[in-house]
Image: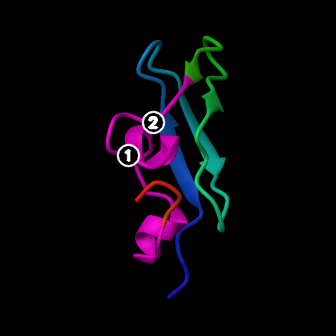
Amino acid sequence: MKPKLESTITCPVCRHVEVETMPEDFCQYYYDCKGCKALLKPKAGDCCVYCSYGDTPCPPIQLESPCCSR
């Protein structure tokens, strides 16, 4: 199964929405909001910003593979 690589990420600060392509082989820990420039980090218990703020979890989680912090 091939993971979905696009996720719509929503900034919790300004609610800006952006479609981004996720990396396939690692978790993205930081994300700079293109709306307000806030530096987003994962919520406690999440491995990356896509799992916290995106509409699609990161590829390692989709494939149920070991992830950087899980």
Identity of the residue drawn at 65% across and 14% down: 37
23 w.r.t. 36: above or below: below
Q: Is residue 42 magenta?
A: yes
| Secondary structure mainly formed by the magenta segment | loop
Q: Which secondary structure lies at badge 1?
A: loop
Residue 46, numbered circle: 1
Identity of the residue drawn at 50% across and 88% down: 1
Q: Amino acid at mark 1?
A: Asp
**How would you rate the neighbour count of disc 1 (Cα within 10 Å): few for under 14, some for 14-19, many for 20 or more?**
some
Percent across and percent down for residue 28 are 61, 47
Horizontal side, residue 24 vs residue 4: left or right: right
Residue position marked by numbered label 2 in the rendering: 42
Question: Which stretch is magenta?
Answer: 40-66
Q: Is residue 53 magenta?
A: yes
- The CA span between labels 2 and 1 is 6 Å
21 w.r.t. 62: above or below: above
Q: Which secondary structure lies at badge 2?
A: loop
Q: Amino acid at mark 2?
A: Pro
Percent across and percent down for residue 6 are 58, 57
Instruction: Mark 2 and mark 1 in contact? Answer it, CB < 8 Å.
Output: yes
Toward which corner of the image does residue 32 lie, by quadrant? top right
Identity of the residue drawn at 42% across and 37% down: 53
Residue at the extreme bottom: 1
**How would you rate the neighbour count of disc 2 (Cα within 10 Å): few for under 14, some for 14-19, many for 20 or more?**
some
Foreground pick, 51 / 69: 69
Identity of the residue drawn at 53% across and 74% down: 3
Q: How many marks?
A: 2
26 w.r.t. 8: above or below: below
Foreground pick, 10 / 61: 61
